Amino acid sequence: MRHFTYRSLGELEEAARSLGAEHVHFEHDVARMQQALTRKVKVGSRVAGNSMAIHPMEGCDGDLAGVPGELTWRRYERFARGGAKLIWFEATAIREDGRANPRQIAINEGNVDEYARLHEMMMRVHREEWGTTDDLLIPMQLTMSGRYSVPNKTIVYHNPLIDQKTGTPPDFPVISDDELERLEDDYVSATGLALRAGFTAVDIKATHGYLLSELMGAKTREGRYGGSLENRTRFFRNVFGKIRAKYGQQVMICMRLGCFDCVPYMMDEATKLGKPLDYPLPYPWGWGVNPENPMEPELTEVKQAIGWFKDWGLELLNVSMGSPYYNPHIGRPFEKPDEGSYEQPEHPMLGVDRHFAVAGELQRAFPDLPMVGTGYSWLQKYAINAGAANVEAGNIAFLGLGRGVLSYPDFAKDVIEKGDLDELRVCKTLTYCTFLMRTKGNEFGQFPSGCPPFDKLVYGPIMKEARESRRGK
């Protein structure tokens, strides 16, 4: 279903108004747009050289031991040359049993030197291109994939709707409090490895339905990590405290936080549109949801938690939402779904508006905690106009692009030098990158993910092979 038919910024702006996307605004003036996006951002004791960020985009291209592969190196060299001053390094598993696919990268004692070489390369090429790395931030996203770990999942609690989507039996055991306490120390150890590799910032990832994200919504869990908000945030209080106690100010603590779970969706076989699974009211699970209408965000608890995180040492927040596994349109408004997934149940502009509304409310509530915004890629070449408007209004500190940088890793350079993006290079949100990520049928059990339409020489042949694998050839 095609939605993005706009031939000008004016047409796109009029569509936002007519759809009631009241939080979607655009900066029309090129000089003002450039001024907003090249604005320096104070992050803790450091300063990022501009307000453009690259989200953590997993490439599924490590080797089976978790070591970054050739395509990983290629991707980060392109990002480092691209001009964004916040490059959020992708999900890096802290343990072997925390990997979401067989080729997800993972950091450990045996491969930390490889990460050091990769980080050194990023610093070197960025310095070659931009003269300095004093204003470059590269947080490493530390992850434990939890329910989505392979081959063995780990769950925090039972949400019957998510259990249904993930094929989790109702008697599947949940991780114990003692195991969670030991996991805290694994995050601290991984932080030490990241520091040894040269990374001076780490992200304690809590989004997209992975283990720590699930912990935030564990209202029905018993014990010291479930139930009350104090218990559901206990893990973060402990991890932040242990990191600070061991490493002091050597490391910046960051977080990519899912701020609205919504509910799981399925495909309506008659219409092919996404529709929510039947849910009870009040809705007893989830995070950032209105229990009387879990289709709506409710940010009271989210704000309370962010306030605590800030008190405990959080210095940079990346605002996310939804889960690509059970409601992909919430997190990633798209033009075309992944093959086999549902069509958008709403106009993508409304998904963009939800992102901007949530991020704006949170950034205004914590103006001295810089936040990175999500949900821009569907706006194509006009994402930079929307990002500039949000930065100017104080609704976000950083414009973040995820899918968009797979096709256009140097978008920031074009913003700085031209004040415009090339229509022929911007992501069209056709979801081929997700198709590759979801395709498993090769000798590694995982195809690498990238942008076949706009990075054809590298990912075109991979896409062909993946499609043949899907067809059983």
Image (cartoon, helix red, strand yellow):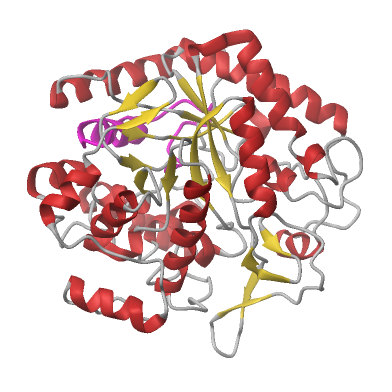
Left or right, 231 with respect to 442, comes to right
Residue at 19% across, 71% down? 9
Residue at 42% across, 52% down? 374
Q: Position of residue 240 (x, y in %)?
A: 64, 23
Left or right, 67 with respect to 453, comes to right
Q: Nearer the viewer, residue 368 or 353?
A: 368
User: Can you say whether 215 is above or below 453 in the image?
Assistant: above
**Residue placed furthest toward the bottom:** 270
Q: Quadrant of the C terminus?
A: bottom left
Verify whether residue 74 appears in magenta. Answer: yes
Magenta highlight range: 57-85
Residue at 60% across, 37% down? 99
**Residue 111 visible in rendering:** no
Q: Nearer the viewer, residue 260 or 457?
A: 260
Q: Position of residue 34 (x, y in %)?
A: 16, 47
Residue at 60% across, 58% down? 325
Left or right, 189 with respect to 59, comes to right
**Residue 289 visible in rendering:** yes
User: Can you say whether 52 is above or below 191 in the image?
Assistant: below
Q: Position of residue 50 (x, y in %)?
A: 26, 35
